[in-house]
Amino acid sequence: MLEILVAAFANILTRFLPFVFFKKHAKKFVFLKDDLPIALLTILTLYVIFQKSVDFYILEYRLLSIVMTIIIHIIFRKFLLSIFIGSLFYIYLIN
């Protein structure tokens, strides 16, 4: 029972503390809303391209998937949707 209470308290703290802590500094973090999705897409793209195993056909599939992800992101402007569709497209291509 004690473990459940400790876990519940830790869960509440992790959900509550960011709002309490960042309430004073909210204006400093507004840029994350606009800049973080494109930064994460760039990091994921570089990670996918520069993996250790470089096979021409796999690289071609990766590049096609990256183009698909970029197109979906430009059309819908939804970060998770573009990553999800790009990943599904890549899985479709390699299978």
Image (spheres, grey):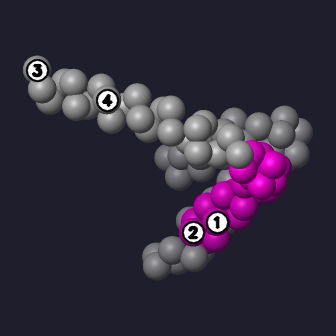
Label 1 sits on residue: 43
Q: Residues within 10 Å of mark 3 (few under 14, many from 20)?
A: few
Which residues, given as a range, are shown in magenta?
A: 25-49
Identity of the residue drawn at 58% across and 45% down: 21
Q: Residue 1's mark?
A: 3
Amino acid type at mark 1 = Ile
Q: Can residue 59 be seen in this view?
A: no
Q: Do the residues labelled 1 and 2 touch (CB within 8 Å)?
A: yes
Q: Are marks 3 and 1 in contact (CB under 8 Å)?
A: no
Q: Are marks 4 and 2 in contact (CB under 8 Å)?
A: no
Write down the quadrant of residue 82 in the picture. Answer: top right
Q: Helix, strand or loop at disc 3?
A: loop
Q: Are marks 1 and 4 in contact (CB under 8 Å)?
A: no
**Where residue 28 sits: x, y (%)?**
77, 55
Label 4 sits on residue: 9
Amino acid type at mark 3 = Met
**Where residue 19 sits: x, y (%)?**
60, 36
Cα–Cα gap, marks 3 and 1 = 42 Å
Amino acid type at mark 4 = Phe
Q: Helix, strand or loop at disc 4?
A: helix
**Where residue 41 sits: x, y (%)?**
69, 57
In-image side of 53 versus 86 (left or right): left
